[in-house]
Image: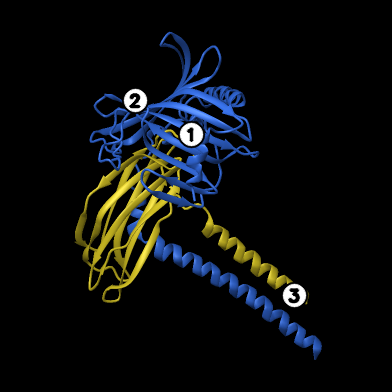
Chain colours: A yellow, B blue
């Protein structure tokens, strides 16, 4: 009986520890979406990230790539916006136009100087990816993180 | 027989515990290493201009610590004077910039570079902003962008954007300046103190500069930024926080005002005006 209780306690603790890690802030962590069989057995990937670089700088990243195994296809994005908000109002943004290459990967970074804010400040990477293999995949989403 | 069964049961349970931990570790690592961090992603992360000062010689840490302590004392005193829990805090400030902010309003017009921020914050008993209405106004007093926050929902009415799951947050009436100077001190950056007269008033300013490792294109500016200076001003007589400036020093030596925030007024009230409460009603 004691062993059973111990087992359950350990199991619950381990599960809680792991769930806490995955629920913690995502600043500096890639937000990756995947699509199977983009060309043959290869996967297509679309990623966005927001990074804080120092007390006055941050960066928005975007990437489109293939893997397992990497295969050259036409990939990129139709637009990429890096945006900063303060208390929900947009304070600055950089909009980059379409980018497309025939390769296994493409990525870009927009560097931003932080605007001072009295409340909650967020940085966003927003864009529509475009990966054209045997199928065309165009995921579009906005990835935001608080900028302390 | 019973004892043997119990022993087998015990070993099986420990085996299960071990297996669970092993599986979780394998799952966690494989998902991070294989899916989130293939080399292609790591190469993007290494693309950081970095700070020259941060890796260089530590500069006058003791002196910087003293100055950061002075800044903290003045900001805390100023906060005590202007913020009350369970009250509405009305903050009016002036923003100016010489750099295109890249925001196009729904009218098709670019967002002004200079505007008045007119914010109402309700600070709860824990000292956190629980609700608020935030407006940007042009020189004629017309609101060109507005958002509101309540029940963990932030709505930008101008751009019809709705964000859920925003937790109550601290009110930084120093616009984050104190935390910036603390970070600068931790990086070993030198903080300089100056006494200067501005518009007939004597101010004390505290300045630090982050030098980028390589000149970098930032935001919508075409030129390359070499260093970034942060300068905070305090009233010499009252110790009140006056303004904070972010100045870009370009690689051609020119200084650009990237962001200046100047406090116009701060007041607290037991109730917000009806027009503010009506706007808040729209947060659903």
Which disc is residue A3 wearing?
3
As helix, strand or loop, the secondary structure at mark 3 comes to helix
Chain letter of the residue carrying label 3: A
Chain letter of the residue carrying label 1: A
Viewer-nearest residue: A125 or A119: A119
Residue sitting at x 25%, y 62% = A130
Question: Could you tell me how far apart the alpha carbons at marks 1 and 2 are, in whole angstroms?
Answer: 21 Å
Disc nearest the viewer among 3 and 1 = 1
Percent of width and height locating residue B187: 47, 34
As helix, strand or loop, the secondary structure at mark 1 comes to loop
Which residue position holds label 1? Answer: A118
Which disc is residue B139 wearing?
2
Q: Quadrant of residue B13?
A: bottom right
In the rendered view, would you say B108 is above or below A48?
above
Q: Are marks 3 and 1 on the same chain?
A: yes
Q: Quadrant of residue B197?
A: top left
Residue sitting at x 37%, y 61% = B38
Q: Is residue B191 left or right of residue A41?
A: right
Q: Is residue A100 left or right of residue B88?
A: left
Instruction: Spot the residue most to the top.
Output: B200
Chain letter of the residue carrying label 2: B
Viewer-nearest residue: B119 or B256: B119
Q: Earlier in the sequence, mark 3 or mark 1?
A: 3
């Amino acid at each position: 009986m004691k062993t059973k209780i111990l087992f359950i306690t350990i199991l619950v603790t381990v599960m809680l520890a792991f769930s806490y890690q995955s629920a913690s802030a995502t600043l500096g962590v890639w937000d990756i979406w995947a699509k199977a069989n983009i060309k043959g057995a290869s996967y297509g990937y679309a990623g966005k990230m927001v990074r804080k670089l120092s007390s006055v700088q941050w960066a928005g990243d975007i990437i489109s790539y293939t893997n397992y195994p990497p295969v050259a296809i036409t990939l990129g994005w139709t637009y990429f916006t890096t945006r900063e908000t303060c208390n929900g109002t947009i304070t600055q943004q950089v909009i980059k136009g379409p980018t497309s290459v025939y390769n296994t990967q493409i990525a870009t970074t927009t560097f931003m100087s932080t605007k001072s804010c009295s409340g909650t400040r967020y940085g966003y990477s927003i864009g529509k990816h475009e990966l054209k293999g045997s199928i065309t995949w165009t995921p579009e989403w906005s990835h935001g993180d608080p900028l302390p | 027989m019973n004892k043997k069964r119990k022993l087998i049961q015990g070993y099986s349970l420990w085996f299960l515990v071990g297996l669970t931990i092993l599986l979780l570790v394998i799952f966690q690592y494989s998902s991070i290493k294989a899916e989130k961090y293939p080399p292609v992603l790591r190469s993007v992360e290494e693309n950081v201009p970095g700070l020259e000062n941060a890796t260089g010689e530590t500069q006058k840490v003791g002196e910087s610590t003293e100055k950061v302590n002075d800044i903290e004392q003045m900001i805390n005193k100023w906060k005590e004077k202007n913020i009350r829990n369970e009250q509405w805090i009305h903050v009016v400030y002036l923003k100016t910039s010489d750099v295109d902010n890249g925001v196009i309003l729904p009218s098709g017009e670019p967002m002004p570079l200079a505007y008045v921020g007119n914010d109402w914050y309700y600070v709860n008993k824990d000292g956190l902003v629980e609700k608020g209405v935030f407006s940007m106004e042009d020189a004629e007093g017309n609101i060109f962008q507005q958002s509101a926050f309540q029940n963990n929902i932030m709505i930008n009415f101008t751009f019809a954007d709705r964000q859920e799951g925003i937790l109550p947050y601290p009110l930084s009436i120093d616009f984050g300046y104190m935390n910036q100077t603390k970070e600068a001190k931790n990086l070993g950056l030198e903080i300089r103190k100056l006494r200067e007269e501005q518009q007939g008033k004597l101010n004390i300013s505290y300045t630090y500069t982050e030098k980028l490792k390589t000149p970098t294109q930032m935001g919508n500016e075409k030129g390359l930024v070499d260093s970034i200076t942060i300068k905070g001003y305090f009233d010499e007589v009252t110790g009140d926080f006056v303004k904070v400036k972010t100045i870009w020093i370009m690689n051609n030596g020119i200084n650009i005002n990237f962001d200046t925030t100047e406090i116009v007024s701060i007041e607290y009230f037991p109730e917000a005006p009806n027009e503010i409460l009506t706007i808040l009603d729209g947060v659903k």
